[in-house]
Image (cartoon, grey):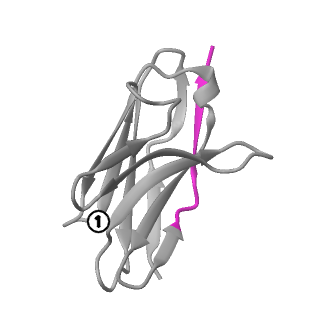
Amino acid sequence: QVQLVESGGGLVQFGGSLRLSCAASGSRFGLYLMGWFRATPGSERELVATINTHSTTTYGDSVKGRFSIAGDFTKETTYLQMNSLKPEDTSVYYCYAYESSNGQASWGQGTQVTVSS
């Protein structure tokens, strides 16, 4: 079982920036993909960004051009740089990891990001 630990959430003003980090441990065969999703109470988790071992990235439409994901798969760590934050970015952000060798997906506990207007 892969454990994921997020850090970097908090309170920021409209237009500000935050950087989230996620460190994985416990992977037996190495991670293929890491990323971030977010959810507010009562809503489904929404894609924020992912990156794989080929450095291919995907972004949710609402964050394109403002957020940037990076990954270091030798350290099994991913980072999410969030710029030009808006109140609608307020959410719990969850780190995600996928091992292609066994098809196992793992989630972190989540970190709160709050953007004040």
Question: Residue 106, percent across and down?
Answer: 51, 70
Tell me which segment is drawn in magenta. 107-117
Residue at 75% in and 45% down? 43
- Residue 31 versus residue 15: which sits nearer the camera? 31
- Residue under the image location 63 percent in, 13 percent down: 117
Expressed as whole percent of the image width and height from the top left, the position of residue 78 reads 33, 53
Residue type highlighted by circle 1: Glu
The residue that mark 1 highlights is 76
On screen, residue 52 versus residue 14, left or right, reads left
- Our reading of the magenta stretch's main secondary structure is strand
Query: Mark 1 Cα within 10 Å, few/some/many (few <14, many 20+)?
Result: many
Reply above or below: 16 against 112. Answer: above
Q: Quadrant of residue 5?
A: bottom left
- Locate residue 23 relative to residue 39 in the image: left or right: left
Q: Per the image, is 114 magenta?
A: yes
Q: Secondary structure at mark 1?
A: loop
